[in-house]
Image (cartoon, rainbow, N blue to C red):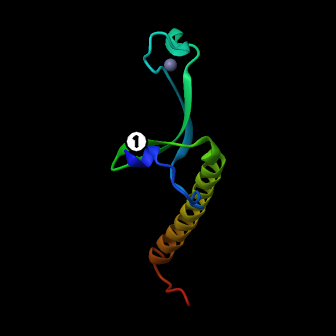
Amino acid sequence: MVLMTERKAGRVPRVVRGSVVVHRRRCGKANCRCADGVDLHESTVLSYSQDGRTKFVMLPAGEIAAVRAAVERYRKAKTKVEDQGNAGLGELIAWLSAPTKKQAR
Ligand SMILES: [Zn+2]
């Protein structure tokens, strides 16, 4: 997949959905240091779900901090809008279900 290998010129977007996780795994080579199952290869990836499936994209070492920050921005913005949406929902329900009085604008 081109996206995973090609280094894009430019920068990490300000807001990114997903989460940064470290994958640890064996590469499968019998003589590799990872063959004992202890000293595994680590790679930092962005984990995200798309079309109901969890996907990963490898992160270049130099971009990990920026992606972490972008993911955190997304998480905070999402929490904020969810809070606003819930407050709005509560207000709307209270308003529409108020039996007698029509509230003044
Ligand atoms: Zn290995």
Q: Whole-percent x and y of residue 97?
A: 45, 73
How many discs appear?
Answer: 1
Q: Whole-percent x and y of residue 105?
A: 56, 90
Label 1, on which residue? Answer: 54
Residue depicted at x 44% and y 15%: 29
Residue projecting furthest to the bottom: 105
Q: In this view, does 82 lie above or below 52?
A: below
Residue projecting furthest to the left: 51
Residue 56 image-quadrant placement: top left
52 relative position to 29: left or right: left
Q: Whole-percent x and y of residue 21?
A: 56, 37
Residue depicted at x 51% and y 14%: 32
Q: In this view, does 100 lie above or below 35?
A: below
Question: Label 1's element?
Answer: strand
Q: Does the residue labelled 1 lie within 8 Å of ligand 1?
A: no
38 relative position to 98: left or right: right
Q: What residue type is labelled 1?
A: Thr
Instruction: Return the residue nearer the eye: 83 or 73.
Output: 73
Query: Is the residue marked by circle 1 packed among few (<14), some (14-19), or many (20+) residues within 10 Å?
Result: few
Residue depicted at x 56% and y 65%: 81
Q: On the rendered image, what quadrant is the N terminus found in?
A: top left
